[in-house]
Structures are given as structure tokens and as C-alpha cells.
Image (cartoon, grey):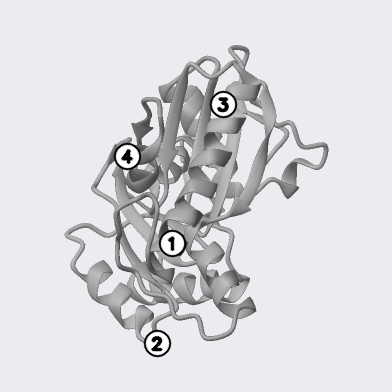
Amino acid sequence: MKLLLDIGNTRIKWCTDDNGHLSVGQAIAYKTTDFTQQLQYHWLKLTESPCTLAISSVSAKQIAQQLIAIAKQIWPEIKVLNAQSTAHAFSVTNAYQQAEKLGVDRWLGIIAMQHYYPGNNCIVDCGTAITIDCLDDKGQHLGGFISPGLQLMKQSLQQGTEDLSLNKKEYPVGWSNDTESAIYSGTLYAAVGLVEKVIKDLNICNKLILTGGDAELLAKNLSFESIIEADFVLKGLSLYCSEGRVR
């Protein structure tokens, strides 16, 4: 069994991989002071000891090192695999001239899309940042777009504007008669508008895959259908592990 770990900009997400059968992903926000204790609690409850810890990380290296230390403390013989973006893998060709510069979470999402939804399709990761990546029917990565995510947009307004308070409450989307709901609708429209503009202009997307913490919110407000894949980076990491590159 493998333990798959996705370290994002805000959350840590993990699941187990038993010969390609993935458990339901679990997540915690690692900027809380006790995230290591929370993680130890969950990992100690695993009924089987994983032989491999596979990591996708776009966060600071020190977070990954902390988690590796926890895993090795619980399972001293565990092996570690750090996923990296490459120029070509799993029938996908990376559009970046410096392949390693493509965020590994994006690369794993692209690999998963090629495997589960081959063809002219796009994946949107709706997390701390919003990233959009497209593949053609030959597995060629066409490139991507990066924008601040909904929470980052709100935080930037808070930092640059006097007397502005924010909350995580949901509001009806549309014309607003108070500041908080106006920010909610404005940032949501900005994110939805970006995705719809990209899909319309590229005009090659047969299926749109949404992943990340705000995927369901965006899906409800898009003018076309989408597919929500909550654990897509972990699915890509599972595929990545199938090459057996454990060190």
C-alpha cells in the first residue's frame, strides 16, 4: 500500500493507494498550529503500514520535510517518492520549455486527465490559485493560465482597501447591496469569467474537469456543464507511482 500526499498552498490532502484502488481523500489546513498532531492522529489509525510515501508538493520544502519525518517516525522502513514534472510521461507532452517549472500538481492533474478523459479537454484547479490547462487529442499540453483563487482575490482587496472586513459566508450571486456580498459576487464572477473566456476562445474543449476546494462553487455558476473530480491530483500521483520510481 502507498500513502499519497498532496501538499498545496493551503491544505494537505492524502489518501491510500492499494494497487490502484484509492481511498477517499482527506484534507486539513496546514497553517493551523497543530496540523502535525492532526496528521499523526489520522495516519496512526491506518490499518496497514504503507511501503511508500508519494508526495506532490507546491509548498515550502520544510512542510514536506516535516511530513516525511512524521511518516518515518511511524513507519521507519517507508520509502519516499517526490513527484516531479517532466517533458513527457504517460502519453502527455509538456508545453513548458523548462518542464520542471510546471507546477507538479498541474502536471499530475494533466496526467490524470489524459488517462481518465483523453481528448481535447481542459482541467481547472480551483484552489489558492486558479490554474487552467488544456490537452489536445494527441496528448500535447497546449499550455495554461494562472490567476488568483477566490480567497486570494478577497485577501488582496482586504490588504489594499481601508476598513474592509471579510468573511467566508456565502451570498446570493448578483447585484449586491452591501460590501461583503459585492466582493463575494465580484470575485466569483471574475473566476467564472476567466474560465468561460478561456474555453470560448480556445474552442477545443470537449470536457471541462474541475478540481480543488472551490470546484463545486464554480461548477454551479458556469454556463456549461463540467465534471468535478475532487481528488484528481491524487489520482495523477497514483498513476505517477505506477512507474515504480521509488527512492
Q: Can you identify the residue that label 4 sits on?
A: 220
Whole-number angstrom distance, CA of label 3 to CA of label 4: 16 Å
Whole-number angstrom distance, CA of label 4 to CA of label 2: 33 Å
Left or right side of 55 for 101: right
Upstream in the sequence, badge 4 or badge 2? Answer: 2
Number of on-image labels: 4
Mark 1 and mark 3 in contact? Answer it, CB < 8 Å: no
**Residue 47 location (% of width, % of height):** 17, 59
Residue at screen point 61% across, 71% down: 60
What crowding class fits label 2: few (fewer than 14 Cα within 10 Å), some (14-19), or many (20 or more)? few
Q: Can you identify the residue that label 3 sits on?
A: 199
Between disc 1 and disc 3, the foreground one is 1
**Residue 51 location (% of width, % of height):** 37, 54
Q: Nearer the viewer, residue 173 or 27?
A: 173
Residue 159 numbered mark, or none: none
Q: Of the residues shown, which amino acid type is indicated by label 1?
A: Ala
Upstream in the sequence, badge 3 or badge 2? Answer: 2
